[in-house]
Structures are given as structure tokens and as C-alpha cells.
Image (cartoon, rainbow, N blue to C red):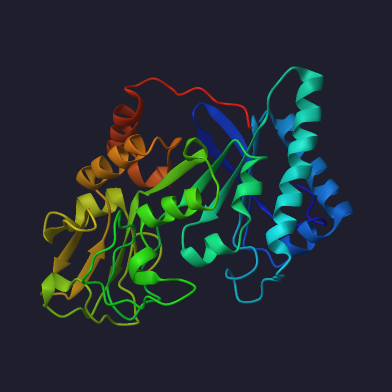
Amino acid sequence: MNARVVETLARLVYITGKLLEAAVTWSQRFSDVAADQTARQKFAASCIKFIQDYGFDGVDLDWEYPVSGGLEHNVHRPQDRGNYVSLLEEIRKQLNDAGQKVGKTYLLTVATGAGADKIADMDLKNMARHLDWINIMSYDFHGGWDAKTGHNAPLYANKDDQSADTAPSFIKSKYNCDKAVQGYIAAGVPPEKLVMGLALYGRGRQGVKNENNGLFQDASAQLPQGTWENGVYDYDDLKKKYMPTYTKYFDDQSKVPYLYNPSTGIWISYDDPQSFGFKNTYILDHKLRGAMFWEFSSDRGSELIGLTHQQLNKGVVPTTAKPS
């Protein structure tokens, strides 16, 4: 990638047998690139060159986030909403032109926020016109930034959640997978272009008192030691170090499990085969495109990944539809 166009990291994403070059950024300058026609053209051209040089099947953009949010010093504009569409339109055009020359159809996808506030900051209907699918990052709904414990990736809301329910976030009612998906559909995205994000990790808190088994309780701002950063646990790590000694509970409203150890005061929200079963059923019932994961190395034994593959397509890799 051309660092003078935008500061970006390259990551590899394996999706339905396709290898995509991903522009991942909490960058201060993504907004600047999207706002300028010449910069958009250069950025798109650099993406095309990269995927052709290294044999990728397409491009995945992960802009966190247009209009608002992300790192403190990120550049934002109200115009990001429309400029994002223009950026995708330019990349799609150049992908199509490049594909015609070599007899190949290149993919264009994005990873996007799941919160109601993030959904409102995007022109999703017009974005979808240029995309093969949208990867909804339907996790990180709650974590160490909250005063109380809450689920990392609830499928549904819990009526007992004490979070605020005011605009623009509506955390209590809309910070869950179901409301995220329905928010995208209401914004004009066809269900068959939506991919639900599934978490292969958990988020933990400490200093949690033994009431309601630790759920929706006050927690320390200091996070407990995790697998690769404080407060964050790989699924594999949870199986080996925490599940044997912690008590597992299941929130039947939100359809996700959690662990709690009253002697240590540590509470951990995560996903397991049971919650993945509910989420995979949801994906099928609502005729979504499929599932994606963050991130593969957290489930090295493929317990959750393999389960999802089996439940969603019975071992058959789904075909890739052209953008409409």
C-alpha cells in the first residue's frame, strides 16, 4: 500500500475460500483520503496493484470509524458519510476494470461497526450497492470502558441491563447482535449482503461483587490480566485456565454464557458452542450471508469455527454472488 496516500496495515482474511487484502485503519487520515477525488483514485489504484502483485481475490476496508469514534486524534468530517460511498464506488470501478482485463471478478467488502450510533454515521444503502457483503463487527458491545459488567456479544438485549438507553447509542436496547443486524436491514442493506461477526474471545472485569452472579454489577476500572491484553481472553485460554475453576452461567435472554469466580471477583463474558448455536440459527433464520470471526488464532482447535461451518453450510463452501 502507498503510505503517502493513507496510513494502513495489511492483514490477510480468509473468507469463503477467498483471500482478501484488507486496509485496516484507526488512521488519522482515512477521512482525508475519502474526501479528495484524486486521493481516492490513488488509493484505489494502490489497492489494485497490491492484490494483483500478491494474488489476492479482492479488497476489504475496515475504517474505524467514519464521522465519529475511533482513536482520539482521528480526523472526522460529517461528509465522511457520503465520502465513504464515493471511495467504495471508485474502488469498485477500478476492481471491475482490472478484473475484466484478466477475466476475474474481484471482491469488495467492508468491516463496520455494530452500534446504533455507528450505523447512523454510514449511508449503508448506497454503500451496499458497491459491495459484495458487509462484515458487521457485532462484538465489543461492552467491556472495560463501562462502569458495570455486560456481555461482549449478546445476541439479544436483556431487560435487566442497567445501561443508558438514550440517543444516539441506545446501549441497553440496541447494543446487541440482533438490533445491529436489524439496523442494517432497516437502513436498506439486503440480508444476503450481511455477515454477522462472531467473537472467538471474551472480555473480563475484576472487583465484581457476588450479586446476580456478577452480571450487571459494578466493576473496577483496572482490568484483570488477560491472554494478550488486560481484560481480553482467547477462547482457547478460557478453556484451559478459566472454565475448569470458574462457574459458568447462561443468560437466557441474551443467549450468551459468562464465567464468574466470587473468590477472585473476576467476571468474564464470552461465547461457546451453545451461544454460537443460537447465533448460527439466527443467521440461517434471517437469511444472512454468513458469519465471520475475530479472530482465528483464538480458536486453534477450530471448535467454534468448525461448528459454525457445519451448522451454516453442512461443509459446503457457499458461492460468491456478484454485487447488485
Q: What percent of the width, then of the height, locates residue 52? A: 75, 30
> Residue at (36%, 47%) from the top-left corner?
298
Horizontally, is 262 left or right of 168 in the view?
A: left
The residue sitting at the right extreme is 38
- Does the rendering let one see residue 118? yes
226 lies left or right of 250: right
Q: Residue at x 79, y 48 (%)?
A: 43
Which percent across, then down, holds residue 25?
Answer: 63, 58
Q: Residue 273 at what x, y percent from top left?
A: 22, 42
Q: Position of residue 35 (x, y in %)?
A: 80, 61
* On screen, residue 320 above or below 172: above
Vertically, is 118 above or below 280?
below
Q: Is residue 7 visible?
A: no
Residue in the foreground of this view, choosing between 210 and 299? 210
In the image, residue 242 sits, relative to residue 225, either above or below, namely: above
Q: Please report the residue visible at 31 percent of the width from the left and 42 percent of the height from the top.
A: 282
The part of the image, by quadrant, that contains residue 177 is bottom left
| Residue sitting farthest toward the top | 103
Q: Quadrant of the C terminus?
A: top right
- 186 vs 171, left or right, is right
Q: Is residue 212 above or below residue 321?
A: below
